[in-house]
Image (tube, coloured by chain):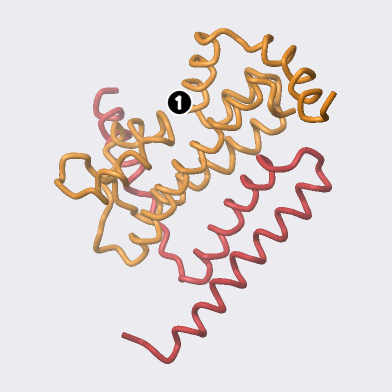
Amino acid sequence: MAAWLANLRHGVLNSLVMAIAHFNALLLFAFFVSVVFAVLSKDTPRERLIYGLKVFLAFVGVALALGWLMYPFPR
Amino acid sequence: MPKKELEVKAASPASAAHPPAGRLIGLCVAAWLIPGLGHLVLGRRGRAAILFLSILTMFILGLAMKGEFFTSGAGSLLSTLGHYGELSVGVAMPIARFFGYHGNPLFVSSDYGTAFLVTAGMLNILCILDVYDIAMGRKK
C-alpha cells in the first residue's frame, strides 16, 4: 500500500506528457480563455456564444497577423 | 431633481444590503481555493461548472506540457510574479507539488505549459473578482 502510494505520488503527474505544436497550443489557449471571458462577461447563452466566438477569432486572428508581420524579422 | 442624484438615491438601498465582510472574504477564499466554488456557493451552478472545467483543464494541460512552477525566492521580479500567478489557481498547485510534479524546462512544450499554468491562475483571479461583484449585488 505504501509503495503504491509512493508510486502514485511520484508517478502520476510526471507520466502526463503532451508535446504540442505551436498553432495547436494557440488554439487550445484561445479556446479556454474565450470560454472563461464569455462566461464572466455575458449573462445569456446566446450572448456568451457570440462574445466567445469573437474573442476566440480575435486571439487567433491577431496571433496570425503578428506572425506574418514578424515573418521578415526571424531574429 | 437632477438625474444623477436620482440614480444615486436609487442605488443606495442596494448598497445597504451588502453582505458582511466575513462572508465576502469566505466567498473570495473559496473562489480562490477551487475555481468555480465561489460561484457554486452563490447558486450559479452552470457558471461554476464551466469555470471549474475550463480553468482546471488549462492547468492540467500546462502540467502535461511540462510547464515550470516559478519560485518566489529566485530574486527575479518576473519569477516572483509568475509564482503568485500560478498560486492564484488555488489548491491545484500544492496538490501537483504533493504528487511530485516538477516541470521540465528542456521539454519541447515547456514554455507553452508555463503560459497555460500562469494563465489558469490569472483567469481564476477574474473569477474571484466576479464572485465579489455578484456578492456585492453589482452583477447578476
Question: Element type at marker 1?
Answer: helix
Question: Vertically, is A17 above or below B18?
Answer: below
Crowding near pointer 1: few (<14 within 10 Å), some, many (20+)? many
Which residue is at the front of the view, A34 or B5?
B5
Badge 1 amino acid:
Leu
Q: Position of residue B93 (x, y in %)?
A: 36, 35
Q: Colour of chain B?
A: orange
- Between A8 and A75, the residue placed more toward the observer is A75
Task: State the residue position of label 1.
Answer: B33
Q: Quadrant of residue A8?
A: top left
Does A3 sit above or below residue B82? above
Which chain appears red?
Answer: A
Front one among B89 and B59:
B89
Residue at figure coordinates x 40%, y 28% from the top left:
B91
Quadrant of the rendered structure where residue B33 is? top left
Q: Report the side of A16 relative to B104 (left or right).
A: right
